[in-house]
Amino acid sequence: MVISALEHEKVTTVFGYPGGAVLPLYDSLYDSSIKHILTRHEQGAAHAADGYARASGKPGVVFATSGPGATNLVTGIANAYMDSVPVVFVTGQVSTPFIGTDAFQEADITGITLPITKHNYLVKDVGELPRIFKEAFHIATTGRRGPVLIDIPKDVQNAVGEFVYPENVDIPGYRPTIEGHPGQINRMAKAIKASRRPVIIGGGGVVSSGSGKYLLELAEKGQIPVSLTFMGLGGVPGSNPLFLGMLGMHGTKAANYAVMEADLIIAIGMRFDDRVTGSLDSFAPHAKVIHVDIDPAEIGKNIAVDIPIVGDVKKTLKRLMKVFKAGQTEKWLERIKSWKTEEYDGATDKDSLKVPNIIEAISRLTTDRKTIVTTDVGQHQMWTALHYCFEEPRTLVSSGGLGTMGYGFPAAIGAQTASPESTVFCIAGDGSFQMNIQELATAANYNIPVKVAIMNNGYLGMVRQWQELFFGKRYSSTTLSGSPDFCKVAEAYGIAGIRVDSPGKVEEAINRALSVQGPVVMDFHVEPEGNVFPMVAPDSPLDEIMDGRDGQ
Amino acid sequence: MKHVLAILVDNKPGVLTRVSGLFSRRGFNIDSLAVGETLDPGISRMTITVSGDASTLEQVVKQLNKLVNVIKISNITEEPAVVRELMMIKVQAAPQTRSDIQQIVETFRGKVVDVSLDSMVIEITGNEEKLEAMEILLQHFGIKELVRTGKVALLRGSKTTREYNA
């Protein structure tokens, strides 16, 4: 019955890991045309489905068993929740009579995941299954997207019932506002026309609603500079002259200075996260704020808003363009141009192997392909945001809100599965990669040709950077001694390994990796104590930027 | 500041946890909470009173609205509404004090619902002030045990909370 529901939802791929309480489900999967990717840990399955969803825009689906199977998903569920990714998790549960008895492999997974799912279900009756699946997919993929979990006791999986898949859903408590208020959109247009120093800040909502094209149209017609949050990267082409780069803690000077001097912030599908705003009291002190978001709870949460618009980003932008008139921004764009020349350039020292140089090389050598880049979390992630030129939406797949180390590699497996024709690069750290290194078996097993590029500096680099800057270089537990030779590990799985020690070998190695048909692990031995700049210290104003030039 | 929220929710297992969980996650202590079925047995109504600052409450209400099982939330703090609570008090009552207690109960339009040789159980409904006044008076005789239902509220006039918008 579950399989029929998935077929109705046009699910073609499921990531998962079987176990006792989910045996009936796996038994029906055995005869089905749905492809199942067996990961080597449930967390890997969760991240893979999340990466699949981000790369394709379609919901990811995960199967896991009860108890430890389900609890192993928790980080992956929280990760999808924080970044609003549509994933449907299906877990087995002990049979109904055993629920609440501390039975073998029993965990109250609906209780555990209450605060980290958009909604969840415990199915008590097989007759409810079709409706619940219909609702789950509807909830996961509409409004502000997010993960939904369905917990199915083993006896319910075994039960037989009539299968009628409902055509429509009717959930009285779930009616997301899709259309932005027309009056507010008119006010938005007037504010943009009147503004002399506007800045657009686009976020993950631009990507998930598929409105990059419309955002670019707004920017170009209005000659308005655009900054993107980490989640929004790719929302407008990175090479566009109006693009300022990412803003926030590791934002560019142009983006952060522009926000601080702007008279109008046009915030679109973003949520004013603390990594974006710096100190809230000093954020955009001269600006009126327009905030467009599908989630009313985000509006006014962190920043006072002058023109709030609850609605889908794409629909709102389309309606806006009908009434839109450009303001005068020539002087403003010139001022911004002067900041762009001040940008920090990490690529000047050519003698040591530096991460920004490697990422720029990957960027250069992959722009002519449809390339998806996934990352783990830490320095290499911020360097990727700063130095990889993301030209299209859904080409960056990375854990923004939760900041989950170990996300990148399984997410790359998921992204590659969703988009077999793409080149998929996973830019990882030596710390992060070891958190889900077991998924090398998955990549090998299914010959999923992801290219893993480990920025191996022998440290938990970002934590070490904070210890250097804020804790007097007391490197408490951030040295990663005992790490393996990653090339040998890869080879043990039958995967090609390429080690790179010098700057001169970078391009050659990347080209070699690209020419390999299957998965590749590249181990870049980079300078150990490189720091990510620019940087704004936490809870500081965005224009107090450390750029590393004067030994800060 | 005290706030009164009337919330219509699906009458399903786990909904109370979803709702109360949102309050605790934002650091709100629920002062009182009463739940019961409505005319439609598929829908329950919760009346929740909480203390806290208005902006945090606004965020909690927005988050509550996102719960799939929550159908409607009305913040009726500032609205003309009838707010009532039921309290039962087990009070020490020797034969010589019994009539004094009886008199107080009558004044407050309460009811004696159980009598034993040395105690009485008194039932009273009313608003917060009335219940507190009653409690203070009966303390004089010695309260053995006390239970309150938590507040329930209805808007005055013909308007219902379903039609209410805020």
Image (cartoon, helix red, strand yellow):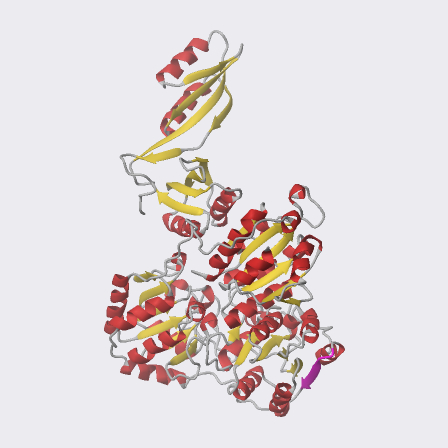
Q: Position of residue B112 (x, y in %)?
A: 44, 15
Horizontal placement of A407 versus A270: left or right?
A: right
Q: Position of residue A380 (x, y in %)?
A: 57, 76
Horizontal placement of B140 versus A414: left or right?
A: left
Quarter of the figure with the N terminus of chain B: top left
Q: Is residue A311 visible?
A: yes
Horizontal placement of A466 versus A191: left or right?
A: right
Magenta span covers which residues? Answer: A494-500
Taking the spot 43% from the left edge, 84% from the top edge, the residue there is A239
Single out the residue that lies furthest toward the right. A492
Residue A330 lies in quadrant:
bottom left
Q: Position of residue B147 (x, y in %)?
A: 49, 27
Single out the residue that lies furthest toward the top. B96
Q: Position of residue A110 (x, y in %)?
A: 58, 50
Q: Is residue A400 magenta?
A: no
- Nearer to the camera, A276 or B113: B113
Predominant secondary structure, magenta span:
strand
Query: How many circles with numbers are drawn on the protein?
Result: 0
- Nearer to the camera, A194 or A49: A49
Q: Is residue A470 visible?
A: no
- Nearer to the camera, A350 or B84: B84
Horizontal placement of A313 versus A167: left or right?
A: left
